Image (spheres, grey):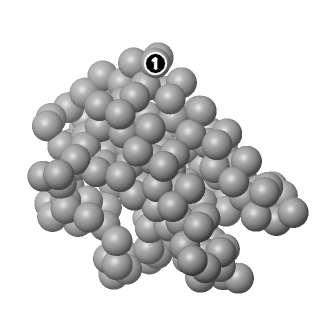
Amino acid sequence: MTASQAIGRRFDAVLATLLDRTNGSRTTLRVDLPALGFHVNDVAGEARQPEEKSLRGETGIDQRAVETVKWLDRERRPLIQDDLSATDVPAPAALIEIYGARAQMLAPIIVDDALLGWISVHYSKGARNWSTSDTAALDDAVKDVHAILAAAAA
């Protein structure tokens, strides 16, 4: 197993825990780590319910040009969206139309004062009021990803 595969499996484990804790539809991590072959235009890790489409290998969207990512880069805090049909920060149309997301939470991964990546939790069963335990689970996942990144850099 390569270092990239081992790190990818650790990312997947963090995302599986996050999926379980939030009862989400899909969780993803996008991160720029070129030395390990990761780029934000593809997911570095993913967990999803069986009925959900995977985002792995779907690289057609320039992720850093998306309004939600610009918001994360500017605000440097989680973006919580209870209803993607009624939000001031629009999600990519494909996320809604093709992948069925109706609500989402995004959290930035900040390293050396740069937006290195982000974690997403998508929910496809309708609008949703994310709870404090959901946002706490997202915060824990961010900490876990930071620990994986620190170990990889050591």
- Residue 28 percent location from the top left of the image: 42, 55
- The residue drawn where x is 31% and y is 67% is 55
Label 1: state its secondary structure. Answer: helix
Residue indicated by mark 1: 133
Residue in the picture at 34% in, 71% down: 56
| Figure quadrant of residue 118 | bottom right
2, above or below 82, in the image: below
Q: Looking at numbered disc 1 in the image, what kind of residue is underneath it? A: Ser
Q: Position of residue 109 (x, y in %)?
A: 65, 52
Q: Is residue 47 above or below residue 126?
A: below
Residue 148 placed where, x, y %? 69, 54
Residue name at image x 54 percent, y 56 percent: 11
Whether residue 146 can be seen here: yes
- Which of the image's four quarters has the C terminus? bottom right
Question: Viewer-proximal residue, 126 or 30?
Answer: 30
On-image quarter of the N terminus = bottom right
Residue reaching furthest to the right: 154
Q: Is residue 64 visible?
A: no
